[in-house]
Image (cartoon, rainbow, N blue to C red):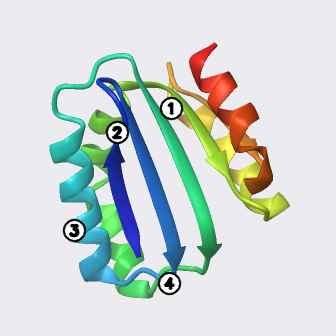
Amino acid sequence: MFKVIPNGTNRLDLEMSGKLDAEEIRIAIKELVSKSENIENGKMLYDVIDFRLPSIGALAIEFSVLPTVFGLLRKFDRTAVLTDKPWLQKLSELEGILYPGLKIKAFNRNQRAEAEAWLNS
């Protein structure tokens, strides 16, 4: 399951749970592009509820749309990632190094208030 929820003018909240297949990834990216169309200097709160590695087909879709994802991420300044998996927290923050202009900070899922405060700082 992947949800994209607008939260104000320049913010999207994302929720991910379970294992995503190719079709879910395709739909999620279309939804992300559509709902971020008018965003500038945006913020994103990404809640990883139950992470499972995506299917091989989903990974292939992800790699095929990397240019779209790079363009999309330029619309955002900050992303807070909520996850209880330490390795996913580290990977998320490492990803921030790969996207110039985007700060990514990871929090435990029970630190939502801290994540919200960081996004708004």
Quadrant for residue 26, please give it.
bottom left
State the residue at coordinates (50%, 32%): 99
**Lower position in the chain sequence, tag 1 or tag 2:** 2
State the residue at coordinates (43%, 86%): 56
Image position, residue 70 (x, y; %): 34, 39
Which residue is disc 1 drawn over? 99
**Lower position in the chain sequence, tag 2 or tag 3:** 3
Q: Give the alpha-carbon distance from disc 4 to disc 1, as whole Å.
A: 25 Å
Vertical arrangement, residue 54 with respect to residue 7, above or below: below
**Lower position in the chain sequence, tag 4 or tag 1:** 4
> Which of pointers 4 and 2 indicates the residue nearer the eye?
4
Badge 4: residue crowd in 10 Å (few <14, some 14–19, many ≥20):
some
Amino acid residing under circle 4: Lys
Amino acid residing under circle 2: Phe
Amino acid residing under circle 3: Ile
Badge 3: residue crowd in 10 Å (few <14, some 14–19, many ≥20):
few
Q: Give the alpha-carbon distance from disc 2 to disc 3, as whole Å.
A: 17 Å
Residue at disc 4, secondary structure: loop
Residue at disc 1, secondary structure: loop
Residue 6 is left or right of residue 47, and the answer is: left
Which residue is disc 3 drawn over? 27
Which residue is disc 2 drawn over? 70
Image position, residue 37 (x, y; %): 16, 33
Do the residues bearing badges 1 and 2 touch, measured as CB atoms within 8 Å?
yes
Which quarter of the image is occupied by the C terminus?
A: top right
**Lower position in the chain sequence, tag 3 or tag 1:** 3
Which residue is disc 4 drawn over? 19
Q: Residue furthest right?
A: 86
